[in-house]
Image (spheres, grey):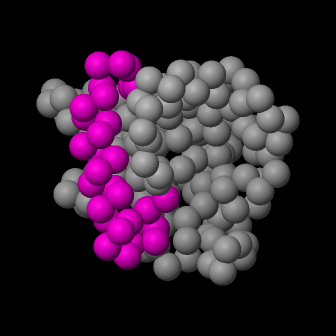
């Protein structure tokens, strides 16, 4: 059974497995994986819930992370940043996402991105900025499956980032 939702306390073991897979990929040299080890899951969960309401920093966007579960296993995450503040307006965008290495290429992120775009639409946001490294063809292909307008490149951290404005669905 597939499910897209926020984290719960009972997800601790699935989250650890998800995180371990991503950290191993990062350690093996994949610099596209941006994740850090979470030592205190309960504190991480509380902070994630707080960030949906108030980040405590006026320069940061409120955000919600949604996770893709299949048969109790966490396979992917999509982060929805509700405002474009600071560097988000240039290179970070509204959305960040990652799929476990062993489940890439199966359409999971397309499902998650469709879900996220509907969440933005429900909040009255008609266009979202999504960025991907210029050399990340898989991510760019996922974005381009949606009504996306390419908006050029921006440089940051020694990389060029492709910028896309994606229309949210009208219902």
Image quarter hosting the N terminus:
top left
Q: Is residue 129 visible?
A: yes
Residue drawn at 35 percent across, 58 percent down: 23
Q: Is residue 125 visible?
A: no
With 36 as the anchor, is 149 left or right in this view? right
Q: List x then y, in percent, for residue 47.
A: 58, 27
Residue drawn at 46 percent across, 54 percent down: 35
Q: List x then y, in percent, for residue 146.
A: 49, 52
Name the residue furthest front. 39
Q: List x then y, in percent, for residue 167.
A: 61, 45
Residue drawn at 47 percent across, 52 percent down: 36
The part of the chain drawn in magenta is 5-34
**Which quarter of the picture shows residue 5?**
top left
Residue drawn at 76 percent across, 40 percent down: 60
Residue 27 or residue 134, whichever sits in front? 27
Q: Is residue 6 magenta?
A: yes
Q: List x then y, in percent, for residue 71.
A: 15, 30
Q: Is the residue 59 above or below the residue 153 in the image?
A: above
Residue 91 or residue 49, whichever sits in front? 49
Q: Is the residue 66 above or below the residue 25 in the image?
A: above
**Dominant secondary structure of the residues highlighted in magenta in the image:** helix
């Amino acid at each position: 059974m597939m499910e897209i939702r926020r984290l719960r306390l009972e997800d601790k073991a699935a989250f650890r497995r998800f995180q371990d897979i991503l950290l191993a990929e990062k350690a093996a040299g994949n610099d596209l994986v941006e994740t850090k080890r979470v030592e205190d899951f309960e504190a991480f969960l509380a902070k994630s819930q707080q960030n949906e309401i108030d980040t405590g920093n006026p320069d940061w966007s409120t955000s919600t992370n949604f996770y893709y579960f299949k048969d109790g296993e966490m396979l992917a995450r999509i982060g929805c940043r509700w405002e474009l503040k600071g560097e988000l307006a240039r290179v970070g965008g509204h959305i960040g996402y990652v799929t476990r290495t062993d489940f890439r290429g199966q359409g999971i992120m397309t499902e998650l991105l469709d879900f996220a775009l509907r969440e933005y639409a429900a909040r009255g946001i008609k266009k979202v900025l999504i960025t991907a490294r210029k050399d990340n063809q898989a991510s760019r292909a996922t974005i381009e499956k949606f009504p996306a307008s390419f908006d050029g490149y921006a440089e940051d951290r020694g990389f060029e980032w492709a910028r896309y404005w994606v229309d949210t669905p009208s219902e």
